Amino acid sequence: MPISAVLVYLLVVNLPFRQDSDRKIATSENDAIALRAQVLGSGGVQDAFVPWKRLFSGESVGLAGQPFTAKDLGRAASLSLGLGLIALLLALAWALLLAVARVQLAASRVGFLLEVIPGLVFGSPLFLLAVVAALLAIAFGVSFTGSHLLAAAVMALGPGTFLGVVWSDALRAEAARPYFLAALARGCSRRQALLKHALPNALPALLDAAAPVASSLLLGSFVAENFFQLKGFGLVYLEAARRVDAGVVVVATTLFAAVLILVSLAVELVRLLVDPKARDAAKETA
Amino acid sequence: MTRTLLVSTLVVLTGCARCGKKEANSCPPRDTVTIALPSLPNTLDWSQSHEQSAQNYPALLAMMRGLTTLDADNSVKPGLAASWDVSTTADGKQVYVFHLAPGVVWSDGKSPLRAQDFVFAWRRALLGADGAELEDLDGASAWRSARTPEAAAALGLTAIDDQTLQVTLRGARGYFLSRLANVYPYFPAPSFELEGKSEAEVQRYFNEPANGRPLVLGAFRVTAWDRVGQRLELEANPSYADKPATGAVAHLVLLQSELGALMYEQCNVDFLFFDEPSQLARPPADLASAKLLSTYWLGFNTTRVPLKLRTAIAQAIDRQALLGGLSALVPNPRIAKAFLPPEMPGALADSDARLAALPASDAARAKALLAEVGPLPAELTLLVRGTGSFLPETALAEGIRRQLAPLGLKVKIITTSNFSNDVKEADGTLRYDLFLKRTGADYAHPNTLLTPFQSGGNHYTDWQKLEGGASIAKFQKLLAEGAGAADDARRTQLYFDAQQVLLAEQVAAVPLYFPNRYFRKRPWLEGLSVDPFNFLTFRAMRVNATPPAAK
């Protein structure tokens, strides 16, 4: 995380300074540069944490637009985090539904349709889904809470479908294993065998997909917050990037990097809990 | 890309909403008036201010007042000062003694406004992001650089007693009283609450509103500021003496949203700037407009475009035909015969014969001049704002291109989203031959619109290099004399003479027209308008629940 903080700082701070000023007298540029130096430091590695220090001391980091403080950014982040968690739950629920349906109904009439769904979802740009959902939300006068749920659903559709495909493939592989056939031979129904035996064994495959899903949810939050005008971290970040508001971009990018790193860490911990092979490998390494 | 898509989608959505059930004009009056703005303040600290100060004005003008105020004809009248005396010292300094209006109290309802509140605020303002606005104060430069008690004492700013403020200016500044009405760094601050606090604490006092703070003197005080949600909530200042007798607005919400137009259609917003000129052809029933004290003009890179060619272009442009051809985008245009709009105090009326001395449309003379120029440039580049403007700038550029084409002048239009950044190289060299720009007044005095053409101003014409700087020196001398002129007629003549140097002798710019600003508001919302400086004015806002038809 410190490495990503320093890299982002060096990249953003050393971008050409663009200030659109309508002032009548050309004295503002020097003042603007001085303010920028105050918020961002000199641009050298030693000053990479200047924006963070300002935040921790209660000062703001917004340069071009709103003077965001730690409290402001914390509120935006909590909204995005909440939205992300709802989206994650929706994605998991949709993935489970899709995975089980694809395995159970493969031979039925709807099996073909279930095979087509991932292609349709992956082939549709996220912003298009967001546009349609935003249009529906407005047309039907969806409430404040409803629009947040809809936004979360838009965010969840792609990652959920991806997880569903990964999960169903893993389930199919498990369904061909001897223990599954033995369970069927002992009188278990196919559904029971899937849910009781195959599903837990297919969980590690899901964990492999966790990192791309987290990135996808993050990207989804940018798009959904923008189209639904939800004042979360994604919208703050996009606006800051558009205005080249380096202070906010530095802080936000570092936070995003931190979230992705923490997700990877959490995934590995969960893997140790649910995957005996991973536990054994860890013991051997130890 | 995403932003363009978003905006396009919103346009579609707005269209859909119009087909919906709600009729925008049927939206009933509400306790809380909600206003959608293109951008919200970046600070509420009117003394400290910010590099980009324009977006702060609507909120700060709602919250505060100055020593003077403006009448309907833009003339100066008493504000927080009931009266003032002006004198000149032997060394040419101008001394104003302001007598504060009795009985004015801050929004806590008990603390009186004192002269010390101005001293405290102006000293801070001089050190803030907009400090240059107060440069006319005697000793301002020394205070800004030294910041010592001696420099503070030497500053031309003294509270003689609680009710009397003495201000000494470096010289005669006829525009000073006008500036006090509008330019917010001149507003006072509650010194009794702020003295002794650190600078960080003072900034937090303004920017983290709580418990009725910051104290204000205007019609509204802030109750909450959600910077992420881009929402500013205000309530009526109970101590504001000039509130309307009936229909006073108790709560005011300012918000910034890409969905503003949609929210207006759905009755969630009561005021909205109508900044899409292409939609003026089919104006909504509640569309209103305000005349701005601002000028839209064509500027020349005088280093690359020689005087004869500049004069020929100025005469080749037929403003009447140009704007007549854009009547759908610019309804009822106010054609500019000079740089100063006739509504500006100290400007010439449109009918004044002296205006004939400035370049006007004359195709025959333009052709004759072009013949004298010699080989014409293969192409002239014209820079214009492509986005972020409430004017049809690219259509105006296209109109100019068409008018110049028959004369053999080929114009290439270049659009920008960051004008001040793109107009010049990092070393200050101008990139293009021509550009289009709007300059708006900050206060009701000719000086404000001509200030950019002084040396160090953002005129982007390089005209300070012409004749070794003699022309700009002559121009600045006229401005200085105009600022010091006590007699109105003399002042008007001096500012006209300055325009003659700029527009006729050197043809550094061609004024085209004086723009209006369009907006929509509920019929029951009275007194809410856009002032000549392009800022929303809330002071006289009231709700009249009686439907207009029933009146």
Image (cartoon, rainbow, N blue to C red):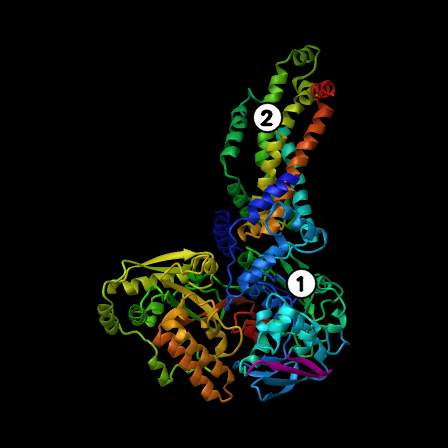
Image position of A144 with respect to A211: above or below: below
Q: How many marks?
A: 2
At label 2, counting other C-alpha atoms closer than 10 Å, the crowd grade (few under 14, some 14-19, many 20 or more) is some
**Residues at marks 2 and 1 touching, judged by CB atoms closer than 8 Å:** no
Q: Quadrant of residue B34?
A: bottom right
| Circle 2 residue | A166
At label 1, counting other C-alpha atoms closer than 10 Å, the crowd grade (few under 14, some 14-19, many 20 or more) is some
Looking at numbered disc 2 in the image, what kind of residue is underneath it? Val
Looking at numbered disc 1 in the image, what kind of residue is underneath it? Glu
Residue under the point 39% across and 63% down: B435
Does B384 sit left or right of B257 as displayed? left
Q: Please state the horizontal and vertical placement of residue B480, each as a whole percent of the image.
A: 48, 80
Image quadrant occupied by the N terminus of chain A: top right
Magenta residues, dominant SS class: strand
Element at label 1: strand
Observer-nearest residue: B197 or B264? B197
Q: Quadrant of residue B331?
A: bottom left
Residue A156 appears in view? no
Q: Please state the horizontal and vertical placement of residue B237, each as a whole percent of the image.
A: 70, 72
Residue B513 appears in view? yes
Residue under the point 71% across and 76% down: B117
Q: Please state the horizontal and vertical placement of residue B71, each as a whole percent of the image.
A: 56, 82
Element at label 2: helix
In magenta stretch: residue B160: yes
Does A172 sit left or right of B462 as displayed? right
Image position of B61 with respect to B226: above or below: below
Q: Which residues are magenta?
A: B156-171
| Circle 1 residue | B233
